[in-house]
Structure formats: structure tokens, C-alpha cells
Amino acid sequence: MKKLTAVCALALALTMALAPAAYAAEWADPAQVCYPSSVTQSEDGTEIRKFYDLSPEDDPTGIPRSDFEQDGYHYTLVDLLKQELPEHESRQHTETVTLESKNKDMASVLALLPQEKAFVTDDGLAGTLTLRLDTVQVEIAGYGNSTRQVSATRTYPNLAGQDTQYIPKTIQDGGRTLTLQDVSWQTDNTGSLDGYALGDRYTAVATYTGSATSSYVKGYTVTADYTGTVSRIALNKTRYVAIFEGTPLQPAEPVDDGLEATDPAPAASFNWPLLLVPLGLIAAAGGGIGIALFLKRRSELAEGGDEDA
């Protein structure tokens, strides 16, 4: 009986030792996911290329390979290319700059534009670009309006009396309508009445005022191109290009039988290795128990043989 107990304990210990290792292998962490450094798409949307620049420490198995849907297309990985990046990469680059200026004369504009400027492209190439004078353009950015007061004077001589009824209340001056603002009177002729000098003719000096509106340029927009060579040195990286082909997503076909269409439930994905782990443990435990029973039976037969002797 003691031997049977010992064997059962050994089988149980073996089962408990194997279980953590089996489940650890099943639920091991996947490779670290890699993210693309840039993505391009064909004009018709049927191909997407994802570029991964990986260092020696990066694991390319982390590059996503699963299908995905985007912009009405279903994309499937068709190829994964490996490219060794060159030690030195360079190309010509043109960058257009836009800025505002208060003046349009070239001296003021060039004062805003440095002859050279450092530049770094989106994909990491750097260099010094030079201003192209033949590309400098100046355009009006917009207009504003201003209003000012204007005035004009009119003289009306030989009037019979100092009465404003003889004076126009408005006048036209330079295409603008001005309104009578003030009148001053001058005596033109003097007569005598009972020894007193009296004026019998007058001159009116009328002042008219109004407003004038004019437009002005608010500012100017300056554009210019800078060109030059940009380059970079690859730092021991490998480029992977994941090529996905896209097919248009087809709309669901309508159901003509008048019954509401129901999609069958998707088949459950069964993890067979996960099922085999406990089955193996049960088999191991059963084997241990079987061995224990065999040893017990042999011990009993041996004890019976001794009693017969």
C-alpha cells in the first residue's frame, strides 16, 4: 500500500510540473509589432506598400501580415521584400516657401528671403538649399478701404440779399456729392439811404463737406523655390517592403425570397493544442496510476507465493 501511495504522489507531481510549462508555451507573448516608416498607395487603390526600416535589434516577424480593409478595398499580403539600404543616399530636392511682405519692391522682398537654408525632408534626408531668384513671385494679398473728409468752396457773387435760398445745398466735386456746411457773406456794392451806407449787392462764400472712400493694398504674398541636394547615411538598417493587393469590396446581394436573410454563425475556432495539453496530463497521470496498480498486484502475488511456501 505504501508503494502505491508513493507512485500516485509521483504521478501527481509530474502532472503539476508539466502543466505550467505547457500553458506557458501556449500563451507565449508574440513578437513585438513593427510600425511602418512610410506608406504609399497606387492611384487606383489596388496596391498598398508599407515600408519598414528595421535595425538589427528589430525582429521582422513583427511586421503585420494579416488582411485588412480600407477605403472600400480588401487587402491581402502578396509579397514581402527585403532591401539593404545603401550606405549613402542623396537626391535633388525643391522646397517652395511662402511668406508675407508689407512692400513689393525687390529689395524689401529679398531682405525676407535668406540665400541659403537648412532643410530636412520627411524621410530624414538633410541638406542646404539655395534660393532661386528666378522663382521669386510677389502677389497682392488683399485690399482694404479707408474713408477721409473732403471739402470744397464755392463763391456766389452779386446776390440781392444775404439769403441762403440763393445757394445750392449740395454740389458735385470730383464725382462725390458734398453738402453745404457753412456760408460767409461779402458786400459787393454800397448805396446811401438817408445818409447811411447800405449794401445792396452781396457775395456768398459757401463751404461744402463730404467723405471720400479709397482702397489700398493691405500686403503682399511672396513665394520662392529653394533647391539643393539632400542626403543621409544609413545606420545599419534593413528595409522591408510589405506589398498588399486590394480587391473591391462587393456589396451584399439582396435576398429575393421575401425572408429575412440571416448569416450563419461563424464556426468557432478551436485550439487543438490547448485541448491536447490536459489530455496528455491525464494520460500521464493514468499511466502512473496503472504502474502503481501493476506494482501492487505483483506485490500481492509475491506475498501469496510466500504464504503457500
Image: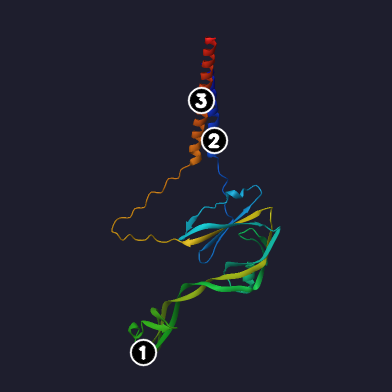
Residue type pointed to by label 1: Ser
Task: Name above or below for residue 276 compared with residue 55.
Answer: above
Q: Earlier in the sequence, mark 1 or mark 2?
A: 2
Q: Residues within 10 Å of mark 1 (few under 14, many from 20)?
A: few
According to the picture, the residue beneath numbered tag 2 turns out to be 22
Residue type pointed to by label 3: Gly
Q: Where residue 131 is drawn, which disc sits there?
A: none
Task: Name above or below for residue 98 compared with residue 171.
Answer: above
Find numbered disc 3 in the image and state the secondary structure of the residue it sits on.
helix
Q: Can see residue 5?
A: no
**207 with respect to 302 (left or right):** left
Task: Name above or below for residue 274 compared with residue 309.
Answer: below
Point out the residue furthest to the right here: 87
Residue 290 rendering spot, x and y as whole percentages: 51, 25
Residue 61 rendering spot, x and y as whole percentages: 59, 49
Q: Can see residue 76?
A: yes
Residue drawn 49% across the image and 31% down it:
282
Real-space Cα separation, disc 3 to disc 2, in angstroms: 23 Å
Residue 48 rendering spot, x and y as whole percentages: 54, 60
Find numbered disc 1 in the image and state the secondary structure of the residue it sits on.
strand
According to the picture, the residue beneath numbered tag 1 turns out to be 192
In the image, 195 versus 117, the foreground residue is 117
Task: Name above or below for residue 160 compared with residue 151.
Answer: below
According to the picture, the residue beneath numbered tag 3 turns out to be 290
Q: Earlier in the sequence, mark 1 or mark 3?
A: 1
Q: Residues within 10 Å of mark 2 (few under 14, many from 20)?
A: some
